[in-house]
Each structure stands twice: as structure tokens, then as C-alpha cells.
Amino acid sequence: MSGADARGAGRDPGLQPERTRLAWRRTTLASTVVVALAVRAVSAGGGSAAGIVACALCCAWWLGFLWVAHRRIRGLAAVSAPGAPAASYAVGAVICTVAMAVCGAVLVGAG
Amino acid sequence: MIDFVRNVRLWFAPAEVRQEGTTPDYRFSLANERTFLAWLRTALALIGGGFAVDQFLPDLRWGWRVGLALALLAAGALCALRAVDHWVRCERAMRRGEDLPVSRFPALLSAVVAVVAVAMVVVVLFGWEG
């Protein structure tokens, strides 16, 4: 550990913060796939009013997810040894995910 | 169940977790966070699967199609809630120096995914005409 510091890199030799950043990126990508399927459901199926509203809400929750991930990634980059995230990040990401599932249920029911 | 309610309170009061025990090596916390994110991706995959069943099996009977889609969406929501619950419990166990919590959830989820997969194969093979 001290050897890595002595070399002046000042970073974790296991690249833990970078791996965590990429894990957030992958998760963002997965949520993008979900929202793309939601948009496809409305655009392909004609879409009732309830379906269009549910799709719009799904997009809004996706933006919320992006915002949470962005904040966390900036937090990871800010310090050299970042600790556990504040629980608000994890809870925020889960709320966005569950809300997308609820919007999906409305879309499926309305279509 | 009482434990679950207590954990739900912890989700929204992260400072209470930080007051317990000692701060673990940050790499363990980051590994815990990545495990949480992996479960969240599993949840998103289940939700995406629900959308996919609804959209890509249009010839199925309405009841089967909507039933399978809603089951997958519900499994995704449950998986996401369980992800944050498990993350909080692991974080707390690491701070207290306890063993990490064990869970039946992975086995349960595997069984549910297997049942849904078999049901979809049966439905797709025999359920086209409704």
C-alpha cells in the first residue's frame, strides 16, 4: 500500500473506485434499456392516454436515475479513498427502479 | 418482519448506520456497493423482461401475456427493494465486525426465474392459438 503511495499515483492499485464507477455506468445502461422498451411499447402499440402518461413518467424516473448515478460518480472521483455512499444514493436508485416497474405495470395493463 | 421494518427505517436514516462500530476498509464498502448495483441490474433485467414479454409475444392469450409480464415486473420491484435492504445489512455487519448476513433470496429468485422460464416455454409452444 505504502509502495503505491510512494510512486506518487495516489490511487488504489485494485482500481476499486473505477470499478465502482463502471458498475454505476452499467446499471445506468440497464435502466436505459428498460426505458427504451417503454417508449417502444407506446410508439408501436398506438398507446392509450394512460399508457402515454406512464411512459412519460418512466422517462422522468430514468432521468432521476441518471442524476443519482451522476452525483455518485462525481462523489467517487472527488476523493482518493471514497467510502460507502450515503444511503440516499442507494435508496434513490431503488426508488427510481421500483417506480419504473410500477409505470411498466400501468403500461402493460393499459396496452 | 420486525427486523425488516427496522431496516426500512435505516434506509432513510443513514447516519444511524454510521454511528455504529468502526468504519471498515473503504474497499469493502465499495465492493458492497458494487454487489448492490449488480442486484439492481438483475432487478432492471427482470423489469425489462416484463416489457419484453408484453411486446414480443403479441399472439399469446391476453391473460397469459399480462400475467407473465406483471409477474416479472413484480419480481423486479421485489429484487430492487431486497437489494437495498441487503446492502444496509451488510454495511452494518461490516461496521460491527459481525459475519455478513446470509439470505435465502438468491435461491428463491433462481426458483422463480426457472418456473417462469418453463411456463414461458410451455405457453409459447402450446398457447399460440389461445
Image: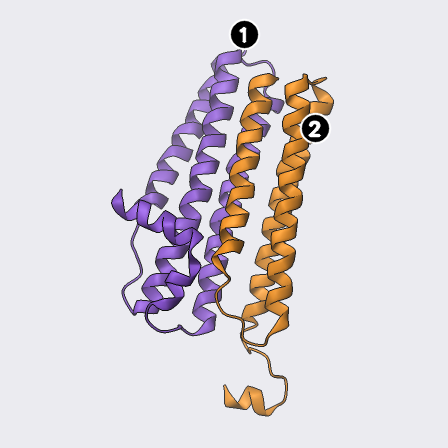
Residue A68 visible in the snapshot: yes
Q: For the point 48% across and 16% down, which residue is it?
A: B64
Q: For the point 40% across and 72% down, which residue is it?
A: B24
**Residue A110, picture quadrant:** top right
Place of residue B110 in the rendered image (x, y in percent of width and height, measured from the top left): 38, 39
Q: In this view, does B11 lie above or below B110?
A: below
Residue B124 visible in the snapshot: no
Instruction: Please tell me whether mark 2 or mark 1 is closer to you in this view.
Output: 2
User: Looking at the picture, which amino acid does disc 1 mark?
Assistant: Glu
On the image, numbered disc 1 is attached to which residue? B129
The one of B112 and A11 positioned closer to us in this rendering? A11
**Chain in orange on the image:** A
Could you tell me how far apart the alpha carbons at marks 2 and 1 are, in whole angstroms? 25 Å
Q: For the point 57% across and 68% down, which residue is it?
A: A17
Q: What secondary structure is marked by label 2?
A: helix
Q: Are marks 2 and 1 on the same chain?
A: no
